[in-house]
Amino acid sequence: MDRRRFLASSLAFACRPERIPVRSCETAGRQGLAQSPTTLGPADFAPSSDCHMTEEQTTGPYYLCVDRHRSSIAEDRAGLPITLGFRVQDELCAPIAGAIVDIWHCDAGGNYSGFDADPELKAGTRRVKTTTTRFCRGSQTTNAEGIAQFTSIFPGWYAGRTTHIHLRVYLPDGRTFTTQTYFDEPTRDGVYLEPPYNGPRKARYRSNADEGVRQDTVMLIAPGPELRATITLRP
């Protein structure tokens, strides 16, 4: 099986989460926390008429079990500011309030906090967990409309992957759901023409097609002077 077919099959292996053990550091002190004020509402998300379920995808090698319940996650990282909105719904398209949405992504240079910096590593090679940094990681609790909102920077890329954001959702009924979201290529390519994304790099990012990215996992980009990206998740 070639790499493209392997990635496509591995990303689409399930559409519903299972009830799995959750480590205490993932929820301790976060259950019942108030959700930060949001500027996004239902109108900022793509409408859907079929309420199809979101596919579950791999956690990836750079997840860290940390407690960062915050909406602003970029810290000192340079990059294009972006507002990220995640709406959690059930199979009837009803909002799920009180879910914890945990996200993590690389910085503009392709580096993940908590791991050594080498975005040029050969695809499939895991970096070593060496640092205590926690930039571009955080969690929020969904509000009554099922929305969790973050401010960050537009993610960069690293060898072997297209641009993406990792998510893990802790649902009020005890289920845990893990997936990834992506960006449309015209938006991504435009961002990457600007600093700090346009510096010299050996690695080239992959296309969404190379990874078999489904359109319903691509975030909706809002027109306007400030970059906003939203997506609805149905675990």
Image: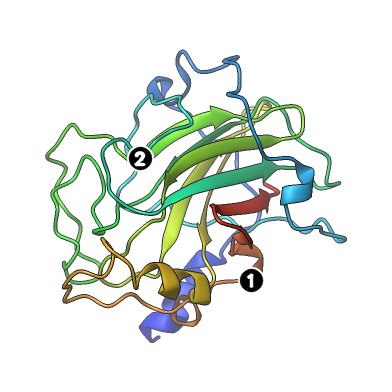
* Residue appearing at x 20%, y 69% in the figure: 199
| Residue 85 horizontal/vertical position (percent) | 60, 44
Which callout, 1 or 2, points to the residue nearer the camera?
2
Q: Quadrant of residue 149?
A: top right
- Three-letter amino acid code at the position of disc 1: Gln
| Image: 117 above or below 175 | below
Residue 99 in the image, given as x and y percentages of width and height: 63, 30
Q: Measuring from the top left, give residue 198's x and y in whole percent.
A: 26, 70
The residue that mark 2 highlights is: 74
Find the residue positioned furthest to the front: 225
Q: Residue at x 37, y 50 (%)?
A: 105
Q: Which residue is mark 1?
A: 215
Query: Residue, x 64% and y 71% (percent of image)?
Result: 215
Amino acid found under the numbered disc labelled 2: Ala
Taking the spot 31% from the left edge, 35% from the top edge, the residue there is 75
Could you tell whether 225 is left or right of 135 in the image? right
Q: Which type of secondary structure does the marked residue at label 2 adopt?
A: loop
The image shows residue 85, relative to residue 206, as above or below, that is: above
- Decide if residue 3 is on the left or right side of residue 92: left
Q: Please, what secondary structure does the residue beneath circle 1 have?
A: helix
- Find residue 6 and report its horizontal and vertical position in percent: 43, 77
Foreground: 69 or 160? 69
Q: Is residue 9 left or right of residue 123?
A: right
Answer with mark 1 or mark 2, whichever residue precedes in sequence: 2
Tell me if residue 64 comes above or below residue 186 in the rendering. above
The foreground one among 23 and 68 is 68
1 and 2 marks in contact (CB < 8 Å): no
Name the image quarter holding the N terminus.
Answer: bottom left
Q: Is residue 2 above or below residue 78?
A: below
